[in-house]
Image (tube, helix red, strand yellow):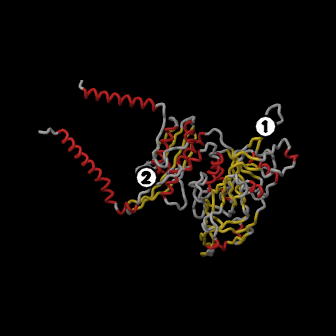
Amino acid sequence: MNKTKRKDITGFLISFLILVLLNFIGSYVFFRLDLTSEKRYSISAPTKELLENLEDDIYVKVYLQGNDLPSSMLRLRNESREMLNEFRAYAGGKLDFEFINPSANPQEKQRERIYKNLYDKGLRPTDIEIRDGGSISKKLIWPGALISYQGKEMPVQLLKSQFGAPPHQVLSQSIESLEYELASTIKTISSKDLKRIAFIEGHAELNQFETADIVGSLRDFYEVSRLPINGNISALSRRFPANKDSSEFHIVNKFDAIVIADPDSAFSEKDKFIIDQYVMYGGKIVWLIDQVSADMDSLKTKRVSMGIAKALNLDDQFFKYGVRLNYDLIQDLRAAPIPVVSGQFGNQAQTQLYPWLFYPLLSSNNNHPINKNVDVVWARFANSIDLVGNDDLKKTILLSSSNRTKLVKAPSRISLSMVSFNPPEEQFNKSDIPIGVLVEGEFSSVFENRLPPNILDAGEIKFKAKSPKTQMVFFSDGDLIKNSYNPNTNEYYALGFDRYTKQRYGNKNLFMNTMNYLLDDSGLILSNNKSFKIRLLDTQLMDNNRLMIQLTNTALPILITILFGFTLNFIRKRKYTVKK
């Protein structure tokens, strides 16, 4: 055996041993590298923990497949596949997925049956315009997935909606939310114990029909009930002895969060005390409060109404918790329209849509997990919020008005005739008025130094003056989660759906994110803070240089290959040509 052959065999054996060693190490050490600048394919620690601790198999069916998908849907499909590959890598063989084309069946009746089945399971389609040269066609796309676990199935909508946003922004927001949407659904479907939410009753709050849609959505993730307080000291908490021989007892909240939605009558001091102590023992509250009584029903019979300040007896409590809800109404030039009778055509009343300044469309500049990638929110007769009191509390504005806002103090006159003239823009000189605020930290009791000794020393009360770290959210619009419904049939519309414009606003997504943030102990919702940059092609440049781009992408690689071949051949000839 010559020296060259021995060298080749030795090199082969060393390479083989290195590969075996790397595979052996790789079977014990798991790691993945993400070389993207924004860590696009790195999932958060809570998501990894969730996947690593799955007790049974998860199966995901994604309905984004097909050869004729538009480029935006191809991008969403590919990003979804990459994300699910990451999930599968950390799930230890307990997660698998497939991509399905729901339009693959050539028979129209069969396709319609498939579409209906997907719709009944909670997925929603979208119509996409496909431009091919000069022709335009429409295609029905189902940008969603169904996640199955132990016989249960839950839908996930992968394509976000954004009112008035360009398609590339919608795509970017959808990709940013992929991890959270998939992981939160997996967490819900695989959880054994559901968190408990109570909607408080007894002060003329929104009834079960007015909250039917949001409660239905919450019940996919939580245990939801309705609860009157009625001065019952144990309404929100339970008491149990510390031990058999002791008179001491512990207090534990019965509910993980409560919702107080649009009360219309005053809270008694006893009910306030019960709510306050619920907070002092770590409870979380979402307040949806109208400080001014105003609605459209009174304008149906007469064209003028009054906005009157309510007397809810909650101002001192709000101030102690770090906010002040003002007795005013917000008018905004960025507003949702309402139908107004503009004339008669025979016996038919003619209606027209006019912007209604008391229906502001809200958003926020803060990229918080609650409001990130949420569509504009539809408010009705909202009030302004001031941030006051305890500076140790962290306060985040979740919703605010536009930069063309006007505040009208109560009592105020509300007239439908306002739609018939253009308001003077110089009066709308307020900007970014808070309408939704998240307050976090250790809250002080509003009853501190107010209770007589006989109550403070009462064994059954166990008063606390300071809370542990907890959270509350204040929305100065009680109608934010109110769905329209027919009182004769009790049928209701989807929350945030405007019957007149057929527009679906972001009210439901905002409130669901709010509850998920308050009740998510794992920190999973923080994955909703991802921000990706979509690097778009310059379509105008492409159109102007189409031929050059096509030649560069087809002919240039061939020329480079031929040149490379000639160069190698030339070098080989020079090296092995025998000199005479």
Which is nearer the eye, 24 or 509?
24
Query: How many discs mark residues in the rendered view?
Result: 2
Is residue 227 in sight in this rendering?
A: yes
Q: Quadrant of the C terminus?
A: top left
Kindly identify which residue carries mark 1.
Answer: 240
Tell me the tag on residue 172.
none
Q: Amino acid at mark 2?
A: Leu
| Residue drawn where x is 88% and y is 46% of the image | 454
Which is nearer the eye, 59 or 322?
322
2 vs 1, front mark:
1
Disc 2 or 1, which lies upstream in sequence?
2
465 w.r.t. 245: above or below: below
Taking 382 as reference, is 66 left or right?
left
> For the residue carrying disc 2, how many other residues have a C-alpha within 10 Å: few (<14), some (14-19), or many (20+)?
some
Image coordinates of residue 95 in percent, x first then y, are: 51, 38
Residue 16, quarter of picture? top left
524 w.r.t. 304: above or below: above
* SS for callout 1: strand
User: Residue lying farthest right?
Assistant: 454
* SS for callout 2: loop
User: Residue lying farthest top?
Assistant: 1
| Residue drawn where x is 56% and y is 41% of the image | 45
Taking 395 as reference, is 576 left or right?
left
Q: CA distance from mark 2 to mark 1?
A: 60 Å
Kindly identify which residue carries mark 2.
Answer: 69
> For the residue carrying disc 1, how many other residues have a C-alpha within 10 Å: few (<14), some (14-19), or many (20+)?
few
